Image (cartoon, grey):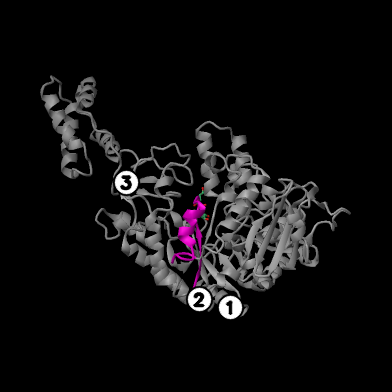
Amino acid sequence: MIRSNKDWFKSAIVYQIYPRSFLDTTGSGVGDLCGIFQKLDYLKSLGVTDIWITPFFESPQKDNGYDVSDYYQIDPTFGSLEEFDRILSAAGDLGLGVIIDMVLNHTSDQHAWFLESRSCLNSSKRDWYHWRKGMRLPLDPNQLVMQTRQDPQAVSTLIDALRELKMLCDDNLVAGIPASLELFEQALMQSETDVGQIELASIYTHLRTLEKGSAPNNWESYFSGGTWTYDEHTAEWYFHLFSAYQPDLNWQNPAVRNALCDVMTFWAERGVTGFRLDAINFISKHPDFPDDKSDDPHLGQRYHIGRSEVHDYLNECYDKVFEPYNLMTIGECAHLSVEETLNFVGFDRQELTSALHFDLVSLDRGTDKYGPKSWCFADFKSVWSKWATALHSRGWMASYIGNHDQPRPVSRYIQPGFEAKGAKMLAGLLLTSPGTPIIYQGEEIAMSNVAWRSIDDYNDIECIGYYRKGLARGQSPEELLRDVNDKSRDNARTPMQWSTDRQGGFTTGKPWLPLNDNFEYINVAQQEECPDSVLNFYRQLTALRSNNRVLQIGKFRELKVNADGIYCYTITHDDVAFLVMLNLTAQSQSLNMTDELLTSYAGELMILSGEVNELDANQEHKVLSPYHFEVWKQNI
Ligand code: TEU
């Protein structure tokens, strides 16, 4: 389906599907495309306009599909191309667009491009990825002489081995050794050592270590550990920002860019309405890969985040694919300022239609992303308001509170016992704020975190890396498990809770990840029956947004309030104004009705979650019940 209106993404409401956890129709325990097909009516009923499906391409599934081994094939775990086309066409009939996830920063190490690239030094695809020689400490001949003096038997074999190595390898490959060899020979001539024999193999091992050297630089990966992995076969290191199974593509190479544009064209031709672009602001790396000498908590970020070349690359994709197919492009743009983000999504740029920022989901992240950090409502509001205001009339954002990489919002921001009320308030915030809202599967029924007892219960490559790294530096397993419980991405990946049936109606088999035990009282079927459910509240909100252009394109302004736990803002456009008042806390809050608030507090009450509380007689206060949310609309 190609949408005709250029600005269509401004009125979109997106629902994100993590296919392996959505609905399994085969009993394999893993969700599949047929499952999505079966739920299209449900998705339509939510009032969303587009679904975004996270990667379903052929993949060894080391990072659940974010390690693609063939961009043109569907992983058999999920189904077939025919089934995907069936979704596209049935969704299209319902007026639902389909956005797919493009993982273009890296491929799987099993992708044919990488297999070819790693096959030999002069492979035609060698420079499709980043390969570097190890950093070697110069071989100190004097030290070697000292060593052999202690073991005189070793000398002659060592010389032979060094000579052989000199012949085998070109100077570049074993830089340092040939020069050292000469010095070593000179030093040896002057010495009076007995010549003996030792195992050639052990010398080779020694030389191999010298040859391998250490990683080409000190950058850190996102999944714990360094960004380089040594490849024995060609004695070079390859670069990966995520796991070693996910080597980074070299976007500097025009052939790579062409190949990736071909991939995107293939899917655009099939009729997708857009792409979510994974880690897109990371695709360009400093070509020299310098050591990061700063004291940044994440070494190397300064050399791969939002570099200027990214804009040239995206501009090229825009001309070739995004623009001709009128696609919505949602760039995952971590750790950028507002101004830097505008370089991707400004209306004057020809790059992306929207971006996802990381400021909100970083609020409670301390060391290494998993360590705890305290946060307060004032910070929460200031981050939200910053992004809600900054881009107005200059560019566009996509907004979200949770996704497949984040713990569940109700467990993160809401006090236990208030999940349903809290979920409604968060939904209200999301769906009345600027930017294209993205609802992550399960949020519409307030699914929550799990807390498993052992790291062995987890599947998430990221949290397992964090746990191992923590153990290595001496942290206690209990402390690490607590961090993992709070932050693991598996929290968002437990299967969708459809009903009280066995395995929550998700599968008839053994689910790939256990369900959250609370499926018996948090599930779609029950909430369908209850007019006051979180699910039905979502429907009210999507309808409100879709029926009111003002909410889609209006101007956001935060109003001053007397308490950090209360958040009030207006959204205005032309002669219509919406007022949103909400309580971020589990306590009732008394809101001082300032003149500014009183002016906006008029017109028609559109939506309410919480107790009906009129103003007091003097019109000075209004009580907002725990996680209260209300919206007013007036003509101005
Ligand atoms: O996530 C990327 C991601 O979360 C990082 O880029 C993020 O910037 C960093 O961790 C913040 O500190 C995407 C996918 O959403 C995720 O599921 C994948 O595992 C990852 O890319 C690798 O493809």
Q: Residue furthest front?
A: 595
The reply, left or right, for residue 627 in relation to residue 322 is: right
Estimate the spatial distance between the alpha carbons at disc 3 and disc 1, rounded to whole Å: 49 Å
Contact between marks 2 and 1 (CB within 8 A): the answer is yes
Q: Amino acid at mark 1?
A: Gly
Closer to us: 367 or 159: 367
Q: Amino acid at mark 3?
A: Glu
Q: Nearer the viewer, mark 3 or mark 1?
A: 1
Query: Magenta segment: does it hold 335?
Result: yes
Among the two numbered marks 3 and 2 on one chain, the one whose residue lies closer to the N terminus: 3
Amino acid type, label 2: Gly
The magenta region covers: 326-352
Earlier in the chain: of badge 3 and badge 1, it is: 1
Q: Which mark is residue 305?
A: none
The mark found on residue 232 in the picture is 3
Label 2 neighbour load within 10 Å: few <14, some 14-19, many 20+ = many
State how far apart marks 3 and 2 are (Cα). Answer: 43 Å
Residue identifier under label 2? 271
Residue 193 location, x and y as percent?
Answer: 15, 21
- SS state under label 3: loop
Residue 410 in view in this figure: yes
Classify 183 as above or below 81: above
Would residue 340 be counted in the magenta stretch? yes
**Mark 1 or mark 2, which is nearer the start of the sequence?**
1
Residue behind mark 1: 92
